[in-house]
Each structure stands twice: as structure tokens, then as C-alpha cells.
Amino acid sequence: MISESEKKALLDQLKNKWQQRYRQYQSLSVMIDTPPKISHKLWLEKEMEDIEKDINLLEGFDYIYVAN
């Protein structure tokens, strides 16, 4: 089981990572018209979605057990 301090530290790291990705997402150009730009936008959206799922998972449970 992870301690409350470990859980808080992990949540803080995930939220910081989400903020970084969000800043990158906000700095994308308005016209996303090339395949690399489209790919990068989709990657950022997927990353943010995955991080949000992890945050919700950690916040949704009082106790989290980690198997060895």
C-alpha cells in the first residue's frame, strides 16, 4: 500500500505533467494543416487524456495497493 505522502507526491507530479502538456497544447498554431502538426496535436490530446485517467484513479480511492 502506498502512503498518503507518496500518493500526494504522485498526484502532484501527474498534475504538473498535465499542466506542461496543456501549455504545449495551448501553444499550438490555430491552423493545424500538416500531418506532423495533426499528429502532434493528437499525441498531446492522448497524453492529457491518459494523465487525467491516472489522476482520477488515484483520487478515486483512499487506499492503493501495489503488487510486487
Image (cartoon, helix red, strand yellow):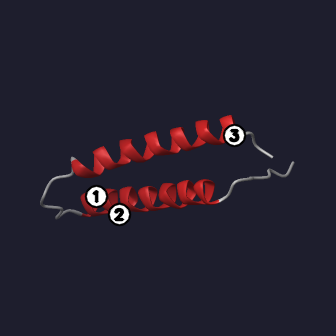
- Looking at the rendered structure, the kind of residue marked 1 is Pro
Q: Nearer the viewer, residue 44 or 66?
A: 66
Counting residues from the start of the chain, the first of labels 2 and 1 encountered is: 1
Which residue is pictured at 29% across the width and 44% down the height?
Answer: 23
- Looking at the rendered structure, the kind of residue marked 3 is Glu
**Which residue in the protein does label 3 denote?**
4
Which residue is pictured at 43% across the width and 62% down the height?
Answer: 46
The Cα–Cα distance between marks 2 and 3, rounded to whole angstroms, is 34 Å
Q: Is residue 57 left or right of residue 14?
A: right
User: Judging from the image, what secondary structure is the residue with disc 2 in?
Assistant: helix
The Cα–Cα distance between marks 2 and 1, rounded to whole angstroms, is 10 Å
Counting residues from the start of the chain, the first of labels 3 and 1 encountered is: 3
Label 2 crowd bin: few (<14), some (14–19), many (20+), radius 10 Å: few
User: Judging from the image, what secondary structure is the residue with disc 1 in?
Assistant: helix
- Looking at the rendered structure, the kind of residue marked 2 is Leu
**Which residue in the protein does label 1 denote?**
36
